[in-house]
Structures are given as structure tokens and as C-alpha cells.
Image (cartoon, rainbow, N blue to C red):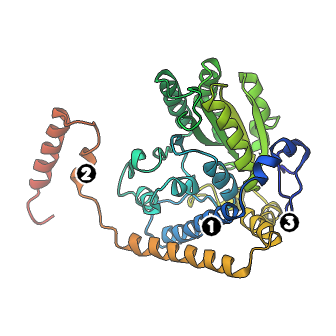
Amino acid sequence: MASGSDAVSVLDEHGAVRPSPAGEPYADRALAVPLEERIGFLRDMVRTRAFDVAAANLQRQGHLALWVSSWGQEAAQVGSARATRAQDTIFPSYREHAVGMIRGLDPLAIVRLLRGVAHGTWDPAENGGFRQYCLVLGSQTLHAVGYALGIQLDGATATGDPERDEAVVVYLGDGATSQGDSNEALVFAASYRAPVVFFVQNNHWAISVPVERQSRVPLAQRASGFGLPGVRLDGNDVLAAFAVTGALLEDARAGRGPGLIEAVTYRIQGHSSSDDPTKYRSEEELQRWADRDPVLRLRRHLELEGVGAETFDLIDAEAADLAADVRRRTLELVEPVVADMFEHVYAEPHPLVAEQLRWLTDYEASYGGDR
């Protein structure tokens, strides 16, 4: 667990302000967040949880091919996403639903992807620089570092104007830290001082492989071997995630180099809807982490700050409306037109793609009208 002195935390498990020793340098930044924004953090987290439950149910009912849950990881995602600025670019893995929604993504775009009716379902330029999901484990880290090197060469970082300077955040799981791509990305980022923050969501399990089998030391400590700072935080503390991510992003934008964050959290559901976590983890372990629910922790904190029941009721109602809307629109989805798969292979029309489309059209027509 990340409740020791080596991990940054600001809120204890009951929602009280009690910074850990490692959290002291970040406490002022965390507690400077106005109360209304903290309420907004809770709204983000509750909406994400409601969407998650609705999508999981849709998958069980046969309306999605796959679902990848973020239940339990809401604080890490919301805190880090809210620390970004509009000009920053974000490279997700495949369960960063909260991050995408915060950057303006319609959650139905995620549904369409996991229903299998589209390949890339959103334009990053129209969704706050939130790039496409990447199901090839760890490959998004190289994409992110390459993009960060690009903005560095373009002079879009370290300009001295914090309102204009850009940075990149890339999300990955503990399992992805064992991938060669991720380690290569860390080498390039450190060597060229690329303006990128690696945000590792350590949810304890790489499908069925426990994190202690992947690394004999906390993942944040591995950053020093690449020559960049690593910070370990309590990933169920949204204020800690916000403060640490904000600090490292400021360094990246200012040209002080990359950083790595290990957010220690827990995946409450299976790795995906195809996974049975009862095969490899105990009910006791699951319950310990369920008791540390990040949504409940923030709610308790807000109650201590004097926020009333009517606010929580409104947030719950908004989340229920979102879930109902996603379900309704999912059931209204139609099967894609076959020709759509040819639309986004290249940015401009390409004769080879056009020829392939003609061939497929003729081939389908050869079956006649009784198919």
C-alpha cells in the first residue's frame, strides 16, 4: 500500500487533511485548490464511476465486444488530468476514461471503440489533445516521447511563458513498465530532456501478474536509473495526484526535463471483461482496497469541509443521467458501413486505397442481392 512515508499523500483514508512526510512539499499546492474545484473533482470521479458501471453492464448484455474498467483508479486519473493545461497533449493507454472525459471526450466515443464499430473514434484536436487509446501495451510511451521531442524542436516549450509552454503526459500501467518500448521511451526522454511526464498507474496487477514480480523496488525508484526524478504517491488521494502532476508538468514545460509518477492504486474489477480476477487474487485483498475507495475518501473530505448532502445528491443525479444517456445512445448505434474502414488510412486520398475499396465493392456485388 502507498500509505507509508515514502508516498505522497495529503488526505488520509478518512478524508482528513494529514499530509505524509513525503507529501509535505506538495501540501500547500494541494490545499490551495478551491473548495468548488474539489467538488468538481468529486463530480468527475462519480461521473466516471457511473459511466464505468453502465458500460460494464452493456458489455455483459452483448452490446460491447469488450470493456476495460477504471473502477478504483478515478482519483489518480482525475487529479492528474485536472493538473494539465489546455495546451498539453495526453497519450492514454486504454482505461483513462476520466482523463478523456475531462478533456472533452464524449464517452460514447469510447463505447464505439470497444463495441468494435470504429477504429479511431475521436479527433484529438477536438478533444483537448487527448490522443487515441492504445491497446498495444507500452507503445504509447514512444509516441508520447516522440511528440514531446517535436514540440521541443518547434520551440513550444521552455519559452519562459507558462501560459504558452507545452508538455506531454503519457499514461501507462505497472505491467507496461516491463515492456521494452517503455524503457526505450524513458531513455530517449532523459537523454533529450523531453517535456514529458510518465504517469504510471500501479494497480497491482498486470492482468494476473503481481507488481512485486515485475519490480523488486517501487516503480518510482526505477526512474533514477534513467536519470529522471520519480515520485511515488497515494493514487487514491486525488489532491496528491493533482499536486504532484502539476509540479512535474511545470518542470517539463519550463525545460527542466521529464519526470515519472507512480500512483499506487488498485484495479477493483478484472483487467478487462474477459478476465476472471478470482483466479489470482484473494477476496481479502480486494476488500482491503475497496475500503480505501477514492470516491468515498474525497466525499468524506468534502463533508469535513462542510459540503452538504444536497450537493452530493445533485452530483449523483448528474452521474445517473450520464449513465442513462450513454446506455440510450449505445442501443441506438447502427452497424458501420464497410467503406468506412478506408476513410482514415491516409490523410489524403490514396490511389491504392481507392482501388482496394473498388475491389471490395465489386466482390460484394458479385454475390447478388440474396446475401
For the residue labelled by badge 3, is the local secondary structure a helix, a strand or a loop?
A: loop
- Residue occupied by mark 3: 14
Q: Which class describes the residues within 10 Å of circle 3: few (<14), some (14-19), or many (20+)?
A: some
- Residue occupied by mark 2: 340
Q: Which class describes the residues within 10 Å of circle 2: few (<14), some (14-19), or many (20+)?
A: few
For the residue labelled by badge 2, is the local secondary structure a helix, a strand or a loop?
A: helix
Relative to residue 18, is residue 309 drawn left or right?
left
For residue 43, the mark is 1
Residue 150 x/y as whole percent: 47, 25
Identity of the residue drawn at 52% across and 67% down:
55
Question: Closest to the observer: 1 or 360?
Answer: 1
Question: Closest to the observer: 203 or 106?
Answer: 106
Amino acid type assigned to the residue bearing label 1 in the image = Arg
First in sequence, mark 2 or 3: give its number.
3
Residue 310 x/y as whole percent: 68, 81
- Which marked residue is nearer to the observer: mark 2 or mark 3? 3
For residue 93, the mark is none
